[in-house]
Amino acid sequence: MFLHDVPVDTARGRALRADFFEHWQTHYAHMRKLLNGYMDVDDFIAVIKEADHSRLWSRGNLQEWEVPYIFLAWKEWAPVIKKKGQLLRPVWLRFWFDSRVRTLDDIWIRTQGDPRIIKAIYRNPARGGSPTLRHLVDTKTLYIDQAFLQAQYRPPVDYVVLKMRQAFPRDFP
C-alpha cells in the first residue's frame, strides 16, 4: 500500500487503538454504510488485525477518523453472501484515495483539508475470481466525512459484537 517507514510512536499508537476500540461500533457502522450496507464482520476483524500487524496505529499523525478509510482502501470487498447462498451485496467494491494521496501523511496535507476517496463498483465475475476492468460498473468520488464519529448509527447485531469480543478479548471489559 502507501505506507512508508516513519518514526513509530508507540504511546500514541496505543492511545489511538484504544480510542478506535472505544468507538469500534461507529467505525463498523460507517464502513458498512460505505460498503452499501453490508460488511462481513470477519473482514472487519481482518483489517483490524492487519492494522495491528503493520503497526498502523503508531504511524505519525494518524487521526482516528482516517482509520476506516484506510481500512476500506486496504482490501477488495467481495460480495457478501449469507450462509444459505443469498447475496446480500452482489457487487465487489474497491476504494482508493484520490491521486493527491501517495502516503498516509498526504491524506490531510496534500489534499488541502479536502480529502476524497474513490469507490469503484464491479459486477461479480461469472467464472469466479477477482473482477477486472471489464467488470467495472461505476465509480463515485466520496468526500471523506471527518465528523462521522459524532454521527448516530444503529448498533451492530449481537453476533457481530460476539465475534469482536472473541477476536479481541483484551479490548473489551
Image (spheres, grey):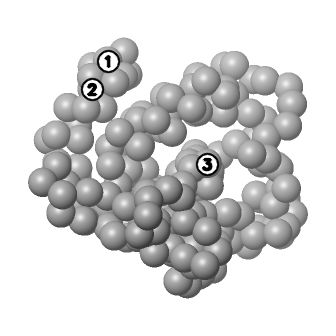
Residue 35 % position (x, y): 42, 65
The structure residue drawn at horizontal position 87% and vertical position 31%, both measured from the top left corner, is 5
Q: Position of residue 32 (x, y in %)?
A: 37, 60
Numbered disc 3: secondary structure: helix
Placement of 71 over or under 172, stated as above or below: below
Instruction: Give 76 or 125, whichever is nearer the viewer.
Output: 125
> As drawn, is 58 to the left or to the right of 38?
right
Q: Mark 3, mark 2: which one is toward the viewer?
A: 3
Circle 3: residue type: Trp
Question: From mark 3 to mark 1, how far is it between C-alphas?
Answer: 24 Å
Where residue 33 sits in the image (x, y, percent)? 38, 66
- Where is residue 65 drawn, in percent x and y? 57, 52
What residue sits right under mark 1 in the picture?
A: 169
Q: Determine whether the residue tagged by mark 2 lies in a helix, strand or loop.
A: helix
Q: Nearer the viewer, residue 155 or 127?
A: 127
91 left or right of 107? left
Q: Secondary structure at mark 1?
A: helix
Pointer 1: residues within 10 angstroms few (<14), some, or many (20+)?
few
Q: Earlier in the sequence, mark 3 or mark 1?
A: 3
Give the residue pinned by disc 3: 74
Labelled disc at residue 118: none
In primary-sequence order, the first of circles 3 and 2 is: 3
Total labels: the figure holds 3
Q: Quick check: marks 1 and 2 in contact, CB under 8 Å?
A: yes
Residues under numbered marks 3 and 2 in contact, where contact means CB atoms less than 8 Å apart: no
Answer yes or no: is residue 65 visible.
no
What quarter of the picture does the C terminus occupy?
A: top left
The label on residue 165 is 2
Specify the quadrant of the image occupied by residue 82: bottom left
58, 85: nearer the viewer: 85
Q: Quadrant of residue 110?
A: bottom right
